[in-house]
Image (spheres, grey):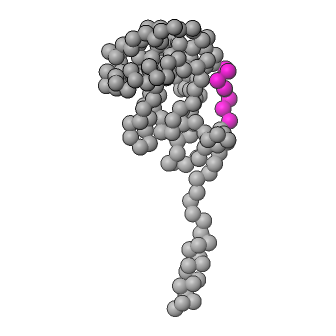
């Protein structure tokens, strides 16, 4: 009996378990492909919390992070993010020049962005440029702020 249990245990341990595969994130575009001219702003415009349903719903978070973050995205915007469950993150941007709020993309693993670019990486890879390819981890996505249409567009 012990011999059979040993063989069963050996067989069980020899079966490979499903593992997440690490994949290198190799975007075709970078932050430099979507430049934004930095605006020199002395004071922040008051947030218009009536801009969107999202801004009315999360006005306290948006106001607080707007004051704390200041200019940090696309030349004259403040990018704001907050948790909405696990794993869930929501975002918005505030135009520092007008105070108007615009909805941003949702994420599971955060955002990466620069103050002099209109591009955002949603669910960015780790510091070495890798992410897990599986049903449990979303792949990185590139979103770009379209200044003319005043909305984010997913880059394909």
Point 43% across, 38% down: residue = 88
Camera-side residue: 134 or 81?
81
Which picture quadrant has residue 113? top right
Residues shaded magenta: 26-33
Q: Is residue 18 above or below residue 83?
A: below
Is 120 left or right of 33, judged from the image as shown? Answer: left
Q: From the image, which quarter does the C terminus lie in? A: top right
Point 41% across, 36% down: residue = 83
Please state the horizontal and vertical placement of residue 132, each as a whole percent of the image: 59, 47
Please state the horizontal and vertical placement of residue 28, each as a whole percent of the image: 68, 29
Please state the horizontal and vertical placement of residue 30, each as a whole percent of the image: 66, 26
Is 76 left or right of 48, judged from the image as shown? Answer: right
Magenta span includes 76? no
| Number of numbered discs visible in the structure rendering | 0
Q: Is residue 114 above or below residue 39?
A: below
Residue 104 in sight: no
Point 67% across, 41% down: residue = 128
Point 67% across, 21% down: residue = 32
Please state the horizontal and vertical placement of residue 101, each as a whole percent of the image: 41, 17
Q: Is residue 7 above or below residue 68?
A: below
Judged by its main secondary structure, the magenta piece is loop
Residue 87 in sight: yes
């Amino acid at each position: 009996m012990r011999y059979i249990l040993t063989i069963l245990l050996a067989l069980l341990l020899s079966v490979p378990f499903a593992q997440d595969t690490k994949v290198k994130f190799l975007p075709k575009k970078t932050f430099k492909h979507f430049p934004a001219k930095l605006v020199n702003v002395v004071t922040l415009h008051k947030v218009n919390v009536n801009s969107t349903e999202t801004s009315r719903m999360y006005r306290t978070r948006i106001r607080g992070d707007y004051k704390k973050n200041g200019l940090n995205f696309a030349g004259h915007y403040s990018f704001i993010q907050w948790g909405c469950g696990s794993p869930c993150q929501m975002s918005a941007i505030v135009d520092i020049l007008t105070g108007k709020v615009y909805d941003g993309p949702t994420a599971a693993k955060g955002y990466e962005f620069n103050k002099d670019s209109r591009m955002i990486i949603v669910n960015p890879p780790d510091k070495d440029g890798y992410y897990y390819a599986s049903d449990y981890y979303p792949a990185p996505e590139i979103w770009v702020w379209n200044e003319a249409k005043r909305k984010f567009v997913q880059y394909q």
